[in-house]
Image (cartoon, rainbow, N blue to C red):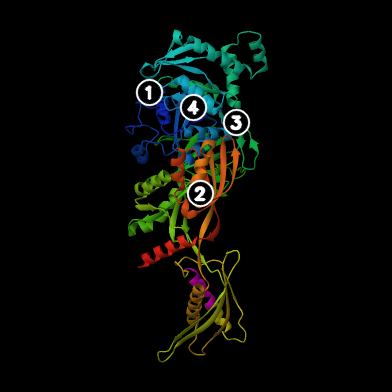
Amino acid sequence: MPKYGLDKIHNTVLLSHGGAGKTSLAEAMLFSVGAVSRLGKVDDGSSTSDYEQDEIKRKISINLSLLPCEWRDTKLNILDAPGYTDFVGEVKAGMRVSEGAVVVVCAASGVEVGTELVWEYCEEAQLPRLIFVNKMDRENADFFKIVEEIRAKLGNKCLPLQLAVGAHTGFEGVVNLLDMKAYIGTQPKEADIPEALKAQADSYREKLVEAIAEIDDALIEKYLGGEEISPEELTRTLRQAVISGSIVPILTGSALQNVAVNRLMDAICDYLPVPREQKVAVSDGSTVDPGETSPLAALVFKTTADPYVGKLTYFRVYNGVIKSNSQVYNANQKAAERIGQLFMMRGKTQEPVNEVGAGDIGAVAKLNVTDTGDTLCVQDNPINLTSIVFPKPTFREAVYPKTKIDIDKMGTALSRLAEEDPTLTVHRELGTGETILSGMGDTHLAVAAEKMQKKFGVNVELATPKVPYRETITVPSKAEYKHRKQSGGHGQYGHVLLSMEPLPERGDNEFGDKIVGGSVPKNYIPAVEKGVNEAYQEGALAGYPVVGVKTTLYDGSFHPVDSSEICFKIAGAGAFKKGMDDGQPILLEPIMNLKVTVPNDLTGDIIGDLNTKRARVLGINPEGGNNVIDAQVPLAEIQRYAIDLKSMTQGRAVYNMEFDHYEEVPAQITQKIVAQKQSQKE
């Protein structure tokens, strides 16, 4: 593939709700330009984009795929992003390195939940975009109905640039409203507009021309004066309108039949910006101009872990050039990185290249220190580009190895997965001893578990995590414990008296001593503290760790021969356990701050459901067409909230939660938990 400059590259991400046909559209593009020799299909697992076993099995995109091709002396780097909301991290990564987007809408299903979500992401990122109404060959496809739905849900700035000629089995091609010609068939032939469409074409063209004319003062004068505006003027001004976000053109076609796909590629070249037109965002909030001869600045946007190739790192070059077998500087890790052979990726195929220039996307294997979101630059002129903002995980599951062999390999496999996907996090829950894997939803974690098995040979099971309860006391107590063993010869003796009181904030435990007169020698006091610290790990009620207790050693006795550190450690632990029993212990549960963003019409349902989960609703604030519900809820009640919320709202609501504080568990629930623990012990 020849080298393209900043004016001859289009990095374009395909976005949609799952199942709208992005992958088929990307495949049709590759086929139209001759980059692949046969049209692959998602259903039989032969598409270039979905090459992982999980994607073929589930028939959905899971990973962001890079699909470069050439069209009209321009390089199109098509980024096929997953439509399923669990894989939103891949969507964010694809959007960060693109100058434009194509939002794909199904001609039968219309604007779905995922469509509205990716639209919001585009609005936030101010990403210029086109809309492509796909699947016009489908039964119940209705272009004009979908156009009205798009305008109602996504805004009046969405205007048809094309009209569909026919639908379902009668779908033949499109009418271009700028040159008022029809383009019929897979290899489009120019034709006259069918009589049945003429009136609609005139009406839609009038609206489009008026909207374009409003962008430019000279054009609006021409338009109001009744003068003819040339197609060149319309195209040029429409391009400005698309880049500024004031118009979003609607195009249409069928990816499976490969009808009007080349007209979409024309529109990408005609209306979406090139890298030269976009400033390079730096992490300190400033921007720099893109330049082919400027010092290197490249952003790593994706990392894949392959058991055979090792780590594969995808990067987008914003400034300068990156060459094979060179050295670069990682601005985030503050370390030099050796670059081996560079590749241009198309799906899973790798084509070796000597260099990747400004505006282009490439990949390199086996980098040592580089992670997703890092900037590669030159050490003499370091720059840190704005990284990718990934959403925080919302769904947690405990991971258990199936066999002893899996125990050893599980930690490595989990850290490799988290490195590959920044929306996955792994941590050990100290209170329960479980390894917790957090992600964006149940499908996300199920796919992660399958990846561990296929890529790293580690078999794991996922389960709902145990709740990390805590125990504390509610009243002050005193306890005495004497550890004594006399069995001839050297005996054992340690004797302590402890006073215990609850701390008002229920924070970290405290230990102190008020020993006077040397009743417990100074060298044995740390041993008592050690014994008490060990006793914190297992409370008196149900064996959960103890918090919020201040323990004071105030008296005791020792034996000049039989006393030792271990004796006082045992005595300290024994006294603490007795004191816990006498301090009217209670169970504490984690309370989470929950923030749910939900459409207005579903707010009542969500509040009703939260009330059944022992939640305290703190407030409801309107935001756009949604309401944001703030609540505090016990973790035990919302372990599976990601699944509940998705089913209640068909995926239209999103939420995040974070730990806030511990609170007393109601008595009837405490009884159940204690009984459950007893039966487990037995």
Counting residues from the N terminus, which is met first, the one under dot 1 or under dot 4?
4
| Res. 616 visible in picture | yes
**Neighbourhood count class around disc 1 (C-alpha, 10 Å): few under 14, some 14–19, many 20 upward:** some
Q: Which residues are magenta?
A: 528-537
Image coordinates for residue 73, horizontal then vertical, percent? 49, 22
Counting residues from the N terminus, which is met first, the one under dot 3 or under dot 2?
3
Q: Quadrant of the C terminus?
A: bottom left
Residue type, mark 3 in image: Gln
Image coordinates for residue 510, horizontal then vertical, percent? 58, 70
Counting residues from the N terminus, which is met first, the one under dot 2 or under dot 1?
1
Image coordinates for residue 564, horizontal then vertical, percent? 49, 84
**Residue 611 has which mark?**
2
- Per the image, label 4 sits on a secondary structure element best described as strand
**Residue 138 has which mark?**
1
Q: Main secondary structure of the magenta part?
A: helix
Say whether residue 530 is magenta: yes
- Per the image, label 1 sits on a secondary structure element best described as loop
